Amino acid sequence: MSAHSTAIGVSSKRGVWGGGNEPLKASYGKLMMWFFLLSDIFTFAAFLISYLAIRVSYPAYEGPLDSFVGSNEYWPIPELVFEAVPFLHGVHAPLVFVGIMTFILIASSVTMVLAVEAGHRNDRADVVKWMLWTLLGGITFLSCQAWEWSHFIHGTDAGSVLTYVNGLGQSVTETVFGANLMVNEYGPAAFAQLFFFITGFHGFHVTVGVFLLFLCFYQAAVGVYDKRGHYEMVEKIGLYWHFVDLVWVFVFTLFYLI
Amino acid sequence: MEIQDTKSTLQVEPRNEEKIKKIWKTAGILLAITVAEFIMAFTMDRGILLYALFIILTIWKAKYIMMEFMHLGDEVKPLFYSIIVPLIFLVWLVIALIKEGSDIFLMRW
């Protein structure tokens, strides 16, 4: 390569290497957020598709719905497992609570997109208002999930009589209450394991999201973004928060409906 | 000491009612699809048809979230495709692992 052509290359490329470019017409931060989300989609997809594979490798429950009992011989029917609602002990309310959780998360996604819209207009008051609603939605969802987990772990009043191999390698037959990673009253061990891993990994994302939402809310409220001259951070955190909602849509279908 | 003026020099623009209306409309669609899924879960028989409908409705919801809420539809085409095209790999993963799972089922039971 001659010095001459290099010189031409440098002079004509100076703009490109000088920084401040926006390939794909998106800023660096937004682009990186998109590619991070793409990698996260693959992680969640691996979890959820493993769920499908393990689910079809077990027999389905065949009998009538009202005589369903939990057993590690077949996969449980989700609407008969997730049927409890806080403060209504013993009331059979299939999928009601998880429906409320889904509604809360979708609602917080809506308030988030309204905050992003306000950010485009540099409207600090609106951004702060909608970020606060989103934050509330995120915290409410996490609280609901904490209750859901607690109920899943402690189990029902009746429990289920199961024969399983315990941690000492002995086959035991006893009434099992609730769930842990070894045995659960609802179905095969893999059912509770997948529940803990998938909703847990999602819940971890929501927790991170709530911290980011708080950061964004705080920075908007004290005027950091006004000084910075743009509200792009609201948009980036918004992308992450919508992603959390997106994953929940799939978790909801695969775990609670199918 | 001089008090710093934290008032913004940014121009606050008026609300774009049309945009906001579109956001609420999308929210309504997402809610309606979820309600439909609920009704189907309790009225239809469990089977391939119901599961297929659930998955189609879920992907439909995902489309609304990505296009309207995450504004992926408003990005330039190369960015749009660099996010969407890699997801095609997942189609194969779904087919492969469901096949694998049903083969394990046949071996076990």
Image (cartoon, coloured by chain):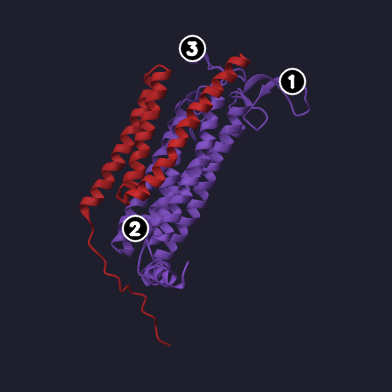
Chain colours: A purple, B red
Residue A129, image quadrant? bottom left
* Cα–Cα span, label 1 and label 2: 62 Å
Which residue has dot 3 on it?
A: A64
The quadrant holding residue A149 is: top right
User: Image check: B73 left or right of A9?
Assistant: left
Same chain check for tags 1 and 2: yes
Q: Residue at x 30, y 70 (%)?
A: B10
Using a 10 Å C-alpha cutoff, classify the residue at mark 3 as few (fewer than 14 neighbours), some (14 to 19) or many (20 or more).
few
> Residue A181 appears in which quarter of the rendering?
top right
Q: Which residue is mark 1?
A: A172
Residue A55 disc label: none
**Residue A81 in view, yes or no:** no
Amino acid type, residue under disc 3 in the picture: Pro
Residue A2's spot in the image, x, y percent? 46, 70
Q: Chain of mark 3?
A: A
Badge number at residue A25: 2
- Say above or below: A153 vs A32: above
Query: Which amino acid type is shown beneath numbered disc 1?
Result: Val
SS for callout 3: loop
Which chain is home to disc 2? A
Kindly report the distance in space between the C-alpha atoms of the residues bearing marks 2 and 3: 57 Å
